[in-house]
């Protein structure tokens, strides 16, 4: 089964139902109209000579036509390059050049960025704008094939790549992760299995297509549901939209969830329609997860994955989270990323590929068709992810409890090594800091120190208008974790984030380690 077959199911079972919807409730496209536009885009690309496997970048905020263009690229046999419109121009240039991208479809609001890409990516041959764009570039509605155009069905080949994802931005040199039709199908099998709803879902998309929020839109499309498109994750607008549109599911990264929880009107809306509030991209502080269950109800659903094994390796279900916050529940469960989904085997292994028993710390590893075949034209980097026994190594350190729940302890590269060889996991320190109500978010890193080797350092981002009591944080960490693991200093500032909302610890480390070097 090709991924396009899955998406076309929506228009087959619910052709006249809303597919793309404005936050005010206006229907932008029915499923029949959405499928028609994707065919017209596909035929337009094929008429211009698009060959199977050619790369097409779509640069856009959340937009109905941008979604249809992504489906059109896949329908034509091309590879959709998922680029964040919020990314730095240099990052996008590197991504497109690395993949030898030949086509660019951009939203008119991104015309200036598109001009930079066109100037610096010599392989680009076709540029089309969604809405008015650069002078001389055709607009999508006049460029695509006329109404009624139909693209031919692709041969069934589940190994055919359909998506390129840029990764490596939080750890170092960028790499390209190809996603094929088999992986894409399994992603949505997992979401459908673990987030079933009795009626076609109504989903809020408030993140770029290249984000997980864009990915979660496709299961809604394939199920004949609707996607309510928000250009940005503005807290009041999201909260209002849930109530107005009787939304059943949404996705936001943890940083946006924290903004919702901090909003003064968060408890003034009706969330009774919600069935699933998806979380992924980075761990959620247990205290915030408990607060979210209290506010939104038993709907918080956390997936764990990585670009190399996308969207759905493990899931902490809404029922799990609700059970954890019950009066007799185990709050530790809120720190878990759940159990393996139906499409993956996930274990904790040692350096030799042996599966470890419960409560032993090792690398989280995966065996699944969800795992990518390898980085694009980068066998050396691919080899670094392979482990004995056919396991894919995630690079995350974790453990499994006696009930089968998996806990992420840290990234291998985020370990803080103190003098004497004692390892400090940043996540356990961050969990304590998150219990302070004035903390919006935090990141714990190790900085060079003559006494400690690496000194545990907490970078704390306060909630708006709140002050941070550094001494109280250090004292509480000492009481709960001991003096070695407690921060030696607190830095109060904003945190650097990727377009996907992940805190960039590498940038923090580089900034402060470089500053230390200059002082020597």
Image: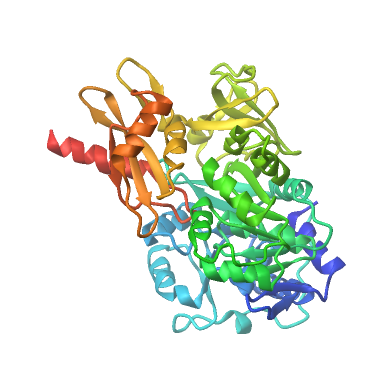
Q: Residue shown at 59%/51% (left/top)?
A: 292
The answer to whether one can see residue 91 in this image is yes
Q: Nearer the viewer, residue 55 or 505?
A: 505
What residue lies at 64% left-to-right and 19% top-to-bottom?
A: 358
The location of residue 86, given as percent across then percent down, is 44, 63
Identify which residue, 430 or 63, lies in the foreground.
430
Tell me how many marks there are. Answer: 0
Whether residue 313 is visible: no
Relative height, residue 209 to residue 369 (above, below): below
Quarter of the image that includes the C terminus = top left
- Residue 386: name its quadrant: top right
What residue occupies the far right of the structure in this picture? 13
- Taking depth in this image into account, of 30 and 105 the one nearest to the observer is 30
Colouring chosen for the image of the structure:
rainbow
Estimate the x, y position of residue 203 in percent, counting from the top left: 68, 63
Identify the residue at horizontal 38%, vertical 37% (top origin): 444
Query: What residue occupies the far left of the structure in this picture?
Result: 520
Depicted 333 relative to depicted 235: above or below = above
What percent of the width, then of the height, locates residue 266?
Answer: 56, 63
In the figure, is residue 154 to the left or right of 73?
Answer: right
Name the side, left or right, on which 343 lies relative to 131. right
Horizontal and vertical percent for residue 330?
A: 64, 33
Tell whether 183 sits left or right of 128. Answer: right
Q: Residue at x 27, y 44 (%)?
A: 511
Taking 237 as reference, is 511 above or below it?
above
């Amino acid at each position: 089964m090709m991924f396009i077959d899955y998406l076309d199911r929506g228009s087959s079972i619910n052709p006249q139902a809303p597919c793309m919807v404005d936050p005010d409730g206006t229907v932008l496209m029915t499923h029949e109209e959405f499928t028609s536009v994707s065919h017209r885009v596909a035929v337009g690309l094929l008429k211009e000579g698009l060959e199977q496997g050619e790369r097409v970048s779509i640069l856009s905020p959340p937009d109905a036509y941008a979604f249809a263009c992504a489906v059109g690229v896949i329908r034509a046999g091309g590879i959709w390059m998922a680029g964040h419109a919020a990314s730095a121009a240099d990052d996008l240039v590197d991504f497109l050049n690395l993949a030898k991208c030949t086509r660019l479809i951009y939203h008119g609001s991104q015309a200036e960025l598109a001009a930079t890409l066109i100037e610096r990516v010599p392989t680009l041959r076709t540029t089309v704008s969604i809405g008015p764009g650069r002078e001389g570039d055709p607009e999508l509605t006049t460029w695509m094939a006329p109404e009624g155009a139909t693209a031919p069905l692709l041969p069934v080949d589940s190994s055919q790549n359909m998506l390129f994802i840029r990764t490596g931005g939080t750890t170092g040199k960028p790499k390209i992760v190809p996603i094929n039709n088999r992986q894409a199908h399994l992603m949505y099998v997992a979401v459908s299995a673990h987030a079933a709803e009795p009626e076609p879902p109504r989903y809020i998309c408030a993140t770029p297509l290249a984000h997980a929020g864009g990915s979660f839109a496709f299961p809604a499309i394939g199920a004949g549901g609707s996607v309510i498109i928000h250009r940005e994750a503005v807290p009041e607008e999201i909260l209002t939209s849930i109530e107005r549109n009787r939304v059943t599911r949404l996705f936001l990264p943890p940083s946006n969830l924290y903004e919702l929880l901090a909003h003064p009107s968060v408890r003034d809306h009706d969330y009774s329609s919600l069935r699933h509030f998806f979380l992924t991209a980075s761990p959620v502080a247990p205290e915030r997860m408990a607060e979210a269950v209290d506010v939104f109800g038993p709907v918080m659903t956390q997936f764990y994955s990585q670009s190399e094994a996308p969207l759905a390796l493990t899931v902490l279900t809404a029922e799990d989270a609700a059970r954890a916050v019950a009066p007799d529940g185990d709050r530790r469960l809120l720190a878990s990323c759940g159990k393996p989904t139906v499409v993956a085997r996930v274990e904790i292994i040692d350096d030799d590929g042996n599966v470890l028993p419960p409560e032993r710390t090792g690398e989280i590893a995966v065996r699944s068709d969800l795992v990518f075949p390898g980085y694009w034209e980068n066998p050396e980097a691919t080899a670094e992810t392979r482990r004995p026994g056919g396991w894919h190594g995630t690079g995350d350190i974790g453990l499994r409890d006696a009930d089968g729940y998996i806990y992420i302890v840290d990234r291998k590269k985020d370990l803080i090594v103190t003098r004497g060889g004692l390892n400090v996991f940043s996540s356990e320190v961050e969990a304590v800091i998150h219990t302070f109500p004035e903390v919006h978010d935090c990141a714990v890193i190790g900085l060079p120190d003559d006494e400690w080797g690496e000194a545990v350092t907490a970078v704390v981002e306060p909630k708006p208008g709140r002050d941070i009591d550094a001494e109280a944080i250090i004292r509480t960490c000492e009481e709960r974790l001991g003096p070695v693991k407690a921060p030696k200093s607190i830095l109060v500032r904003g945190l650097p984030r990727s377009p996907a909302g992940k805190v960039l610890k590498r940038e923090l480390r580089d900034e402060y380690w470089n500053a230390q070097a200059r002082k020597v």
